Image (spheres, helix red, strand yellow):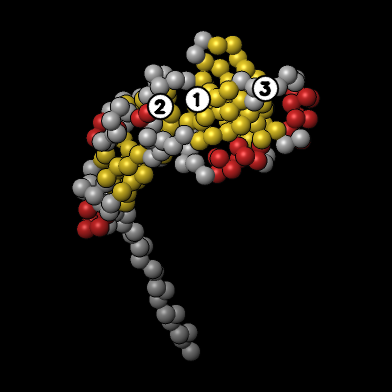
Amino acid sequence: MSTIKSLTAEERKRTGSGRLNQMRKEGWLPSVMYGLGNANKNLKINARAFSDLLAHSTSENILINLEIEGAGNSLAFLQAVQHHNLTGAPIHADFLAIDENTEITAHVPLHLEGESIGVKASGGQLEHNVHSLEIRCLPIHLPDLLHADVTALQVGDSLHIGDLKLPEGVKATHAPDVVVAHVAKPRVVIEEPVAVAAPAKGKKK
Protein backbone atom coordinates (compact mmCIF):
# COMPACT_ATOMS: atom_id res chain seq x y z
CA MET A 1 0.00 0.00 0.00
CA SER A 2 1.09 3.53 -0.71
CA THR A 3 2.21 5.54 2.32
CA ILE A 4 -0.25 8.25 3.35
CA LYS A 5 1.47 11.64 3.44
CA SER A 6 0.37 14.61 5.55
CA LEU A 7 -0.14 18.24 4.59
CA THR A 8 -1.61 21.19 6.44
CA ALA A 9 -4.06 23.44 4.63
CA GLU A 10 -6.17 26.52 5.22
CA GLU A 11 -9.46 27.50 3.66
CA ARG A 12 -9.23 30.47 1.30
CA LYS A 13 -11.76 33.00 0.11
CA ARG A 14 -9.71 34.73 -2.56
CA THR A 15 -10.53 33.82 -6.16
CA GLY A 16 -9.72 35.27 -9.56
CA SER A 17 -6.40 35.06 -11.39
CA GLY A 18 -4.98 38.28 -9.95
CA ARG A 19 -5.68 37.29 -6.34
CA LEU A 20 -4.43 33.74 -6.89
CA ASN A 21 -1.18 35.04 -8.38
CA GLN A 22 -0.72 37.27 -5.33
CA MET A 23 -1.29 34.23 -3.12
CA ARG A 24 1.45 32.36 -4.99
CA LYS A 25 3.85 35.27 -4.45
CA GLU A 26 3.12 34.92 -0.73
CA GLY A 27 4.27 31.29 -0.82
CA TRP A 28 0.87 29.57 -1.06
CA LEU A 29 -0.36 26.96 -3.53
CA PRO A 30 -4.05 27.51 -4.42
CA SER A 31 -5.94 24.23 -4.25
CA VAL A 32 -9.44 22.78 -4.29
CA MET A 33 -10.94 19.66 -2.71
CA TYR A 34 -14.11 17.95 -3.93
CA GLY A 35 -15.80 14.57 -3.69
CA LEU A 36 -17.94 12.41 -1.36
CA GLY A 37 -20.95 14.50 -2.33
CA ASN A 38 -19.62 17.61 -0.58
CA ALA A 39 -19.39 21.11 -2.00
CA ASN A 40 -16.04 22.17 -3.43
CA LYS A 41 -13.71 23.54 -0.76
CA ASN A 42 -11.14 26.16 -1.77
CA LEU A 43 -7.83 25.67 0.04
CA LYS A 44 -4.31 27.04 0.20
CA ILE A 45 -1.22 24.96 1.02
CA ASN A 46 2.36 25.92 1.77
CA ALA A 47 3.97 25.77 -1.69
CA ARG A 48 7.40 24.65 -0.45
CA ALA A 49 5.93 21.81 1.64
CA PHE A 50 3.92 20.64 -1.37
CA SER A 51 6.96 20.72 -3.69
CA ASP A 52 8.98 18.73 -1.12
CA LEU A 53 6.20 16.14 -0.98
CA LEU A 54 6.26 15.72 -4.77
CA ALA A 55 10.06 15.51 -4.82
CA HIS A 56 10.00 12.53 -2.44
CA SER A 57 7.16 10.64 -4.18
CA THR A 58 7.37 8.20 -7.09
CA SER A 59 4.42 9.84 -8.87
CA GLU A 60 1.93 12.67 -8.47
CA ASN A 61 -0.89 10.27 -7.52
CA ILE A 62 -0.55 10.42 -3.74
CA LEU A 63 -2.77 9.63 -0.75
CA ILE A 64 -2.74 12.61 1.59
CA ASN A 65 -4.10 13.31 5.04
CA LEU A 66 -5.14 16.95 4.70
CA GLU A 67 -5.11 18.71 8.06
CA ILE A 68 -7.42 21.65 7.36
CA GLU A 69 -7.21 24.41 9.94
CA GLY A 70 -10.52 24.72 11.77
CA ALA A 71 -12.13 21.88 9.81
CA GLY A 72 -10.30 18.73 10.95
CA ASN A 73 -8.60 16.03 8.87
CA SER A 74 -9.68 14.68 5.50
CA LEU A 75 -8.29 11.73 3.57
CA ALA A 76 -7.70 12.91 0.02
CA PHE A 77 -6.20 11.70 -3.24
CA LEU A 78 -4.05 14.10 -5.24
CA GLN A 79 -6.06 14.09 -8.42
CA ALA A 80 -4.18 16.60 -10.57
CA VAL A 81 -1.35 19.13 -10.42
CA GLN A 82 -1.08 22.13 -12.74
CA HIS A 83 2.50 23.24 -13.46
CA HIS A 84 3.91 26.54 -14.71
CA ASN A 85 4.67 26.31 -18.43
CA LEU A 86 8.20 27.67 -18.11
CA THR A 87 9.46 26.84 -14.61
CA GLY A 88 7.56 23.58 -14.05
CA ALA A 89 6.65 24.72 -10.54
CA PRO A 90 3.22 23.63 -9.20
CA ILE A 91 0.65 26.44 -9.47
CA HIS A 92 -2.57 24.59 -8.55
CA ALA A 93 -3.63 21.24 -7.09
CA ASP A 94 -6.88 19.27 -7.14
CA PHE A 95 -7.70 16.90 -4.28
CA LEU A 96 -10.40 14.23 -4.30
CA ALA A 97 -11.93 13.62 -0.89
CA ILE A 98 -12.20 9.85 -0.35
CA ASP A 99 -12.81 7.17 2.24
CA GLU A 100 -11.64 3.55 2.42
CA ASN A 101 -14.49 2.46 0.11
CA THR A 102 -13.78 5.00 -2.67
CA GLU A 103 -12.21 3.38 -5.73
CA ILE A 104 -9.57 5.63 -7.30
CA THR A 105 -7.80 5.79 -10.66
CA ALA A 106 -4.05 6.40 -10.56
CA HIS A 107 -0.99 6.36 -12.80
CA VAL A 108 1.74 4.28 -11.15
CA PRO A 109 5.34 4.00 -12.46
CA LEU A 110 6.14 0.61 -14.02
CA HIS A 111 9.70 -0.69 -13.51
CA LEU A 112 11.18 -3.49 -15.64
CA GLU A 113 13.21 -6.05 -13.71
CA GLY A 114 15.72 -8.67 -14.81
CA GLU A 115 17.85 -9.05 -17.93
CA SER A 116 16.04 -10.47 -20.92
CA ILE A 117 17.41 -13.73 -22.34
CA GLY A 118 16.96 -12.27 -25.80
CA VAL A 119 19.14 -9.31 -24.87
CA LYS A 120 21.76 -11.24 -22.93
CA ALA A 121 22.20 -14.21 -25.26
CA SER A 122 21.21 -12.84 -28.66
CA GLY A 123 21.97 -9.13 -28.51
CA GLY A 124 18.33 -8.09 -28.85
CA GLN A 125 17.08 -4.60 -28.06
CA LEU A 126 14.68 -4.23 -25.10
CA GLU A 127 11.98 -1.66 -25.84
CA HIS A 128 10.11 -0.26 -22.81
CA ASN A 129 6.75 0.95 -24.15
CA VAL A 130 4.71 1.62 -20.99
CA HIS A 131 6.50 3.56 -18.26
CA SER A 132 3.40 4.39 -16.19
CA LEU A 133 0.35 2.15 -15.86
CA GLU A 134 -3.15 3.46 -15.21
CA ILE A 135 -4.88 1.37 -12.54
CA ARG A 136 -8.03 1.31 -10.41
CA CYS A 137 -8.13 0.19 -6.79
CA LEU A 138 -9.25 1.04 -3.28
CA PRO A 139 -6.95 3.37 -1.32
CA ILE A 140 -5.68 0.52 0.86
CA HIS A 141 -4.33 -1.26 -2.23
CA LEU A 142 -2.67 1.71 -3.99
CA PRO A 143 0.97 0.74 -4.76
CA ASP A 144 3.89 3.17 -4.94
CA LEU A 145 5.51 1.24 -7.79
CA LEU A 146 4.69 -1.65 -10.12
CA HIS A 147 7.20 -4.27 -11.29
CA ALA A 148 7.42 -6.40 -14.44
CA ASP A 149 9.90 -9.26 -14.90
CA VAL A 150 11.34 -9.40 -18.44
CA THR A 151 13.91 -12.16 -17.80
CA ALA A 152 12.13 -14.81 -19.90
CA LEU A 153 11.66 -12.66 -23.00
CA GLN A 154 13.37 -14.00 -26.13
CA VAL A 155 14.01 -12.00 -29.29
CA GLY A 156 10.61 -11.24 -30.83
CA ASP A 157 8.72 -11.77 -27.53
CA SER A 158 6.47 -9.14 -25.98
CA LEU A 159 5.19 -8.58 -22.45
CA HIS A 160 1.55 -7.44 -22.34
CA ILE A 161 -0.53 -5.79 -19.64
CA GLY A 162 -2.43 -9.06 -19.30
CA ASP A 163 0.86 -10.82 -18.42
CA LEU A 164 1.60 -8.58 -15.43
CA LYS A 165 1.22 -9.86 -11.89
CA LEU A 166 -0.54 -6.91 -10.29
CA PRO A 167 -0.88 -6.56 -6.51
CA GLU A 168 -4.04 -7.73 -4.80
CA GLY A 169 -7.02 -5.49 -5.48
CA VAL A 170 -5.32 -3.64 -8.36
CA LYS A 171 -6.81 -3.65 -11.87
CA ALA A 172 -5.31 -2.19 -15.05
CA THR A 173 -7.66 0.11 -16.98
CA HIS A 174 -6.19 -0.57 -20.43
CA ALA A 175 -6.73 -3.64 -22.63
CA PRO A 176 -4.70 -6.76 -21.70
CA ASP A 177 -3.11 -6.92 -25.17
CA VAL A 178 -1.32 -3.56 -24.81
CA VAL A 179 2.45 -4.16 -25.15
CA VAL A 180 4.46 -3.15 -22.09
CA ALA A 181 7.88 -4.29 -23.35
CA HIS A 182 9.26 -5.96 -26.46
CA VAL A 183 12.60 -7.51 -27.41
CA ALA A 184 13.45 -6.48 -30.94
CA LYS A 185 15.94 -8.17 -33.24
CA PRO A 186 19.57 -7.05 -33.00
CA ARG A 187 20.38 -4.13 -35.20
CA VAL A 188 22.71 -5.13 -38.03
CA VAL A 189 24.98 -2.45 -39.37
CA ILE A 190 25.79 -3.00 -43.03
CA GLU A 191 29.05 -1.41 -44.05
CA GLU A 192 29.21 -0.17 -47.61
CA PRO A 193 32.35 -1.27 -49.45
CA VAL A 194 34.83 1.55 -49.86
CA ALA A 195 35.72 2.17 -53.48
CA VAL A 196 39.46 2.23 -54.05
CA ALA A 197 40.55 4.49 -56.84
CA ALA A 198 42.73 2.82 -59.49
CA PRO A 199 46.25 4.20 -59.65
CA ALA A 200 46.66 6.77 -62.37
CA LYS A 201 48.50 5.53 -65.44
CA GLY A 202 51.70 7.32 -66.21
CA LYS A 203 51.75 9.57 -69.24
CA LYS A 204 53.42 8.22 -72.34
CA LYS A 205 56.56 10.06 -73.37
Name the element at disc 3. Answer: strand
> CB under 8 Å between callouts 1 and 2?
yes
Q: Amino acid at mark 2?
A: Pro
Q: Which residue is mark 3?
A: 11
Mark identifier at residue 172: none
Distance, label 1 to label 2, CA atoms, is 10 Å
Can you say which quadrant of the picture contains the N terminus?
Answer: top left
Between label 1 and label 2, give the one nearer the viewer: 1
Q: Is residue 45 above or below residue 34?
A: below
x and y, in percent, of residue 126 in the image: 32, 49
Residue that numbered label 1 is attached to: 75
Q: Position of residue 146 (x, y in %)?
A: 35, 39
Residue 47 visible, this orientation: yes
Residue 31: give x, y in percent of width and height.
Answer: 63, 25
- Residue at horizontal 75%, vertical 30%? 23
Judged from the image, the secondary structure of the residue bearing numbered disc 1 is strand
According to the picture, the residue beneath numbered tag 2 turns out to be 139
Task: Say which of 65 and 94 sits in front.
Answer: 65
Is 27 on the left or on the right of 120, as rendered? right
User: Which amino acid lies under the numbered mark 1 shown in the image of this protein?
Assistant: Leu
The span from disc 1 to disc 3 (Cα, nearest Å) is: 16 Å
Q: Earlier in the sequence, mark 1 or mark 2?
A: 1
Determine the residue positioned at 27% across, 36% down. Answer: 164
Mark 3 crowd level (few <14, some 14–19, many ≥20, 10 Å Cα): some
Q: For residue 50, what is the image quadrant?
A: top right
> At 31% from the left edge and 31% from the top edge, which residue is drawn?
178
The part of the image, by quadrant, that contains residue 91 is top right
**Foreground residue, 134 or 67?**
67
Q: Is residue 19 left or right of residue 96?
A: right
Give the class, few, some or many, for how many residues have Cα within 10 Å of label 2's Cα (few <14, many ≥20).
many
Q: Are marks 2 and 3 in contact (CB under 8 Å)?
A: no
Q: Alpha-carbon neighbours of circle 1 within 10 Å: few (<14), some, or many (≥20)?
A: some
